Image (cartoon, rainbow, N blue to C red):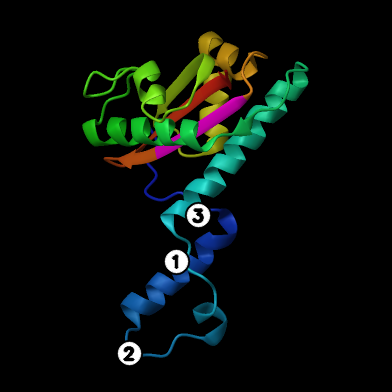
Amino acid sequence: MLQWKHMLRPQFTSAVLLAAVLAGVLSGLEMPAAIAQRPAVTTAQASTAIAQDLLRLVNAERQRVNAPPLVLNEKLTTAAQRHSQDMATSRRMSHTGSDGSTMRSRIDATQYRWSTIGENVAMGQPTAAAVMSAWMSSPGHRQNILNPAFTELGIGQANGGGRLYWTQVFARPL
């Protein structure tokens, strides 16, 4: 399985690496102004970029079968992120949380009122494109992604032991 320590958008990678090298290796020297003025990429920004990338990939697949596009939902994203973090912490991929939680209980805990729900989980894929490819190659996961009954999506991703743990939570509100 591939291991990936950090998920950053490609345009940020060289700036972050250069800044780290300059800060760690050349401490005491002044950082070039062009690099110093670039904003740092936070974990939240990287996660938002990953979620947007995955949403784009999901909606491209849905468009191929004339299913309506999904929109990100904050409560579903909270449920997905909590589950990804739990899987990363316990270092096990499952639809059941380490505390016995289920997809339903995790979504209900966010106060999201739903009429139908679904969940995809994965472990080890280093990018949004790689996890989408894996999910689209699996009939059950593919069915969730393409299900026209779903209108909203939550996306979670967390690193545990050098592996990424992914969660998609699909729903239609009441």
For label 2, the crowd category at 10 Å Cα-Cα, with few meaning under 14, some 14 to 19 and many 20 or more, is few
**Label 1: which secondary element:** helix
Residue range highlighted in magenta: 152-157
Sequence-earlier tag: 3 or 1: 1
Label 3 sits on what residue type? Gln
Classify the position of the C terminus by image quarter. Answer: top right
Residue at point 53%, 44% (across, down): 50
Label 1 sits on what residue type? Leu
Sequence-earlier tag: 2 or 1: 1
Q: CA distance from mark 2 to mark 3?
A: 29 Å
Label 2 sits on what residue type? Gly
Report how many numbered discs are placed on residues in the image: 3
Provide the residue designation for mark 2.
28
Asked whether 22 or 66 is in front, the reply is: 66
* Residue 120 image offset from top left, x and y in percent: 47, 21
**Label 3: which secondary element:** helix
For label 3, the crowd category at 10 Å Cα-Cα, with few meaning under 14, some 14 to 19 and many 20 or more, is few
Q: Is residue 166 magenta?
A: no
Q: Which mark is residue 66?
A: none
